[in-house]
Image (cartoon, rainbow, N blue to C red):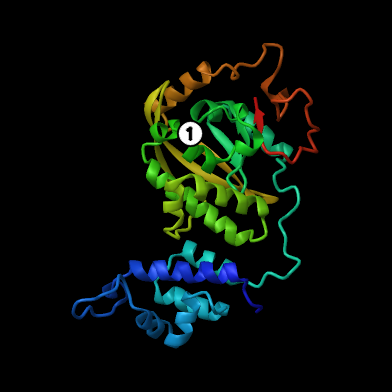
Amino acid sequence: MGHMRSRERRAVGDFLRRRREELRPEDVGMPSVGRRRVAGLRREEVAALSGVSLDYYQRIEQGRASPSLEIMRMLCDALHLNEICRDYLMTLAADRGPDSADVPHADDVHPIVGHLLANMGHLPAYVVNWRRDVIAWNNLGAALILDFSNLQPHDRNLALIYVRDPRMRTLYAEWEAGGRTLAGQLRAAQAAHPRDARLEYLISELRSTSSDFERWWENHEVAAKSNGTKRLRHDIVGQIDLDYQTFTINGAPDQELFVYVPRRGSREEEALMILGAWDPGATLPDSRNPRDTPCVDVTSDRPSARNFPTEPGYQVR
């Protein structure tokens, strides 16, 4: 295993320190004796639990050592980290040779994905990349969240929208929790794509312009693709609770399909029907079959179905 770069070493140290400070002795099967002057576990306790020397653990936390994968696993066990946190640390510790780079044209949307979005028009859906750039969406997705086509391509980013657009605080009932998740997803993406200059610029911009994002970032949390339920307070259909599921796209593992699904027979199902009828772009001309609709739209110079431009942001109708 090679040496980690200084940034990765600092990220490992900061992450371990944050997790250590969150744990109590009883969380890891240790007795809590007397008054403690530090938050969470002491460094010597983590060192003892993981089987490494105190000096070496201190150097890891200070970003001055490159632990092996085996030592990283021992630290993960000692701190009782979940699978998401383990994957994050292992990604940071992995030996990425000097030729490691992001896959070119990873923002390209495959035509089949476009057809999929076009033919699930009754469900709000969109596709994001690892930076949380929205690179494709359907009409109902735009009607539910916002019309992404009104934004410049470089502004079609979920994290930027989340902290910049004041409507998002109203739309997302659990806005704070959602923000922490976005920050955690970007932190995981940073570990997986350490040489992505666009991602680094995005994170820097978010941290410097949003005190909320800076606070979430300093939590050193990580998040992965997920599912669950979101409560939305929409200005057209009111408060609705929608289940959501994310899917990794075959052939494009750094792209993620995000779909909102109403419970069958619920008022949410009716609400989405109302939104679909309200959205001015939802009705196709009578002379065209939905299955013949182009996968991508929003520009007069339509791209080839097999050669999507790399600039993110295509709406399917």
Q: Position of residue 103 (x, y in %)?
A: 73, 54
Question: Which amino acid is tagged 1?
Answer: Asp
Residue at x-position 78% and y-position 34%? 305
Q: Position of residue 34 (x, y in %)?
A: 18, 79
Q: Is residue 25 left or right of residue 167?
A: left
Q: Is residue 211 left or right of residue 111?
A: left
The quadrant holding residue 38 is bottom left
Residue beneath disc 1: 165
Residue at x-position 57% and y-position 16%? 280
Q: Is residue 206 above or below residue 22?
A: above
What is the quadrant of the C terminus in the image? top right
* Front one among 17 and 298: 17
Few, some or many residues within 10 Å of mark 1 (<14, 14–19, 20+): few
Q: Is residue 47 above or below residue 63?
A: below
Q: Is residue 223 left or right of residue 24?
A: right
Q: Position of residue 275 (x, y in %)?
A: 48, 21
The quadrant holding residue 58 is bottom left
Residue at x-position 76% and y-position 38%? 309
